[in-house]
Image: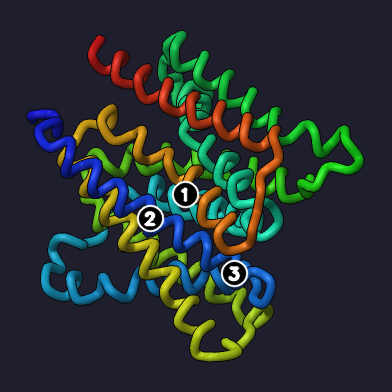
Amino acid sequence: MTPPQDHPLAGMGWMVASVLAFSFMNLIIKFLGDDYNIWQITFFRCLFALLPLFPFVMLKPEKYRWSPRLWKPYAWRVGLGVLSMICFFTSITMLPMVAAMALHATGPLYTVLFSRLLTNEHATRAQMLALLAGFAGIMAIAVPPLVVPMATLDPKGILLGVLGGVFYGMAMLGLRQLSQTESSSKIVFYFSLAGTLALLPVQPWVWEYPQNGRDLLLLCGGGVLALLGQIALTRAYAVASPAAIAPIKYTDVVWAAFLAFLIWHEVPETNVMVGAGIVVAANLWLTGANRMKKAG
């Protein structure tokens, strides 16, 4: 199969659309986080990423037919993916957007680590150096609030942000296995369906009726934005190589800083900006290392 390297500009455009969709979804979560439980917000995120897919499932049911032999990677992807969202979304409400985004962006680095630990997949020296650099970025963000009494970052928020990245990186192992045989739309459908069903039993204990039409629209819109972001992300990787579009992907930290400053006047502390820069650089390094590993 020919590598998808023919349309880098189109891939970059799709990636910009994906980054913007997820950035605005994160803003919605931060805005609603003071008034609604994160478990309820995550339920809406899954539900309204699921509902728009049903017409496509009805039109082409054979494309979305369940694969019983893949229940384990699906369960791995859904369980860890939902945990990642809960931790990440909670960290968004407790930390400056840049800090939460940077900690979550470490996910691909953990994928390398757990690939080595759980599947015995060989990691190159360049991949391991990228992993160590990513950890250095985490330390730059996390250590000052633990040792400086006047630091403004919430240690609990940092812990949840780190766990969100860990769970995300582990969930990607299941996604990698599923992607070998399953279409992206099918994976998104079953993830959203299983996530909705998993979160449904919790709702009686956390449910708050939307206070007004605006909040209801935002709760529903977060799920729709997540779906649009995932579709755009899939299209980006379908038409361009990861090396061409990875730099665009990690502009989400920049967008987080810009939008949070615009809306909440957040000004990240120096250690947060340094740590975020190191994490982004480590991910770009990892992208290059992955490309060299495939080429070799």
Residue 296: x and y, percent?
25, 9
- Residue that mark 2 sits on: 20
Q: SS for tag 3?
A: helix
Q: Please, is residue 74 above or below residue 271 in the view?
A: below
- Residue that mark 3 sits on: 31
Distance between the Cα atoms at labels 1 and 2? Answer: 8 Å
Identify the residue at horizontal 55%, vertical 59% (top origin). 262
Please state if 50 lies on the left or on the right of 32 as rendered: left
- Residue that mark 1 sits on: 255
Camera-side residue: 75 or 244? 244
- The answer to whether one can see residue 69 in this image is no
Q: SS for tag 1?
A: helix
The answer to whether the residues at label 1 and label 2 have Cβ atoms under 8 Å apart is: yes
Identify the residue at horizontal 19%, vertical 76% (top origin). 55
Q: Please, is residue 122 above or below residue 198 in the view?
A: above
Residue 252: x and y, percent?
45, 46
Q: Earlier in the sequence, mark 1 or mark 2?
A: 2
Mark 3 crowd level (few <14, some 14–19, many ≥20, 10 Å Cα)? some
